Image (cartoon, rainbow, N blue to C red):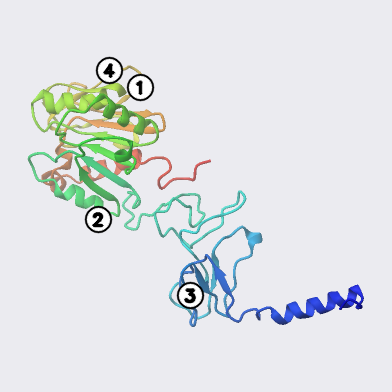
Amino acid sequence: MSNCSPALRLALVLLIHGACSPTEGAGEATTGVDSIGPGPGSTAATGSTTTPDASTTASTATGTTGATTDPPGDTTAGDGPIFDVGMGETTGDACVPVSADERACDGIDDDCNGFVDDIDVGMDGICDCLAIGIIGTSGSLAASQFQQWLIDRGSSAERIDPALVDAAVLDAYDVVILDQLTRAYTPAETAAFDAWVTGGGGLMSMTGHTANPVSAQQWPNGILGPMGLEYQGSLRDGPVTDFLPHPITAGLTSVTFLGGFEVVATIPGQSEVIARLPGAVPAAQAQERGAGKVFVWGDEWIEYDSEWAALPEITQLWVNIFDWLTPMDVCAPPAG
């Protein structure tokens, strides 16, 4: 080789390299890509898959990671491009689809329609990716239909009563509902609620379970007070038929209110009355707080099975509540 010309040495190197390279399309291995619906004859190993002859990997020029082509005749996912849900990485500013539609609550705009995790299989108006925490008990009457209604519509909904409420507890949920509380909350816990709302959480409160002003008013007021909202007065009856224009009140004409309290704004200008009892007594207030939202309702009968069976508008009220309280980054346009 030392006496060969440079051109001859280059040609020999290229010839040897070509002889040692695998034949393209004959089962080359791709590492780190988990394909959906692999074609016949492909095998999978940890961290890698074998690409069948008819498949091709997406060009890096498109900015796509983890895309494969569905072999003709594969009816598992339909002919045409299929993608690894969850890989979803893109380069540059342009969105690149990783699936034909939203398939998972993964924080990615999988189908590039401009919305993240916009899954609503039942078309009921409640995002299937919504995580809901209900703090406290449901009171003296049956309320199982309410929670099951949420679960049936795809949302994660659970009733909790943690010994300590902090950021770790609250960050697990998109929306938190204060039901019949079982204790007072410390200043540190109150600050955690406020920080969570300000950071983008959706908080709702309802009360009226008892005439006892300590548990029915003071305990929730301990959380709501720094936000400029309080329950006050003696028990009042409705129904509520006076609704002011607001997304939560859309389509409502009459909602049950039996033994609830007036909802008062203690800091002017932060909240707005959106529903009133006879005599213009505030029954509900809504507040946008930082990146989050707060909705306070003066009664708890809207969760009871008896009302769900009798008043269809109760369902509409809850749909409106969750639609408004859902954080901006859940089932919404991507940030930025």
Q: Residue at label 3?
A: 38
Q: Which comes before the other along the chain, label 3 or label 4?
A: 3
Give, as a three-letter code, the residue at label 1: Gln
Rendering coords of residue 224 (x, y %): 26, 26
Closer to us: mark 3 or mark 4? 3
Q: Is residue 252 above or below residue 106?
A: above
- Sooner in the amino-acid sequence: mark 2 or mark 1: 2
Residue 198 image-quadrant placement: top left
On residue 266, which mark appears? 4
Residues at marks 2 and 4, CA–CA distance in whole angstroms: 38 Å
* Marks 3/1: CA–CA distance: 55 Å
Q: CA distance from mark 2 to mark 3?
A: 32 Å
- Reading the chain from its start, which is encountered first: label 3 or label 1? 3
- Tag of residue 270: 1
Q: Are marks 1 and 4 in contact (CB under 8 Å)?
A: no
Front-most of residues 169 and 325: 169
The image quarter in which residue 3 lies: bottom right
Element under label 2? helix
| For residue 186, side relative to residue 270 (left or right) | left
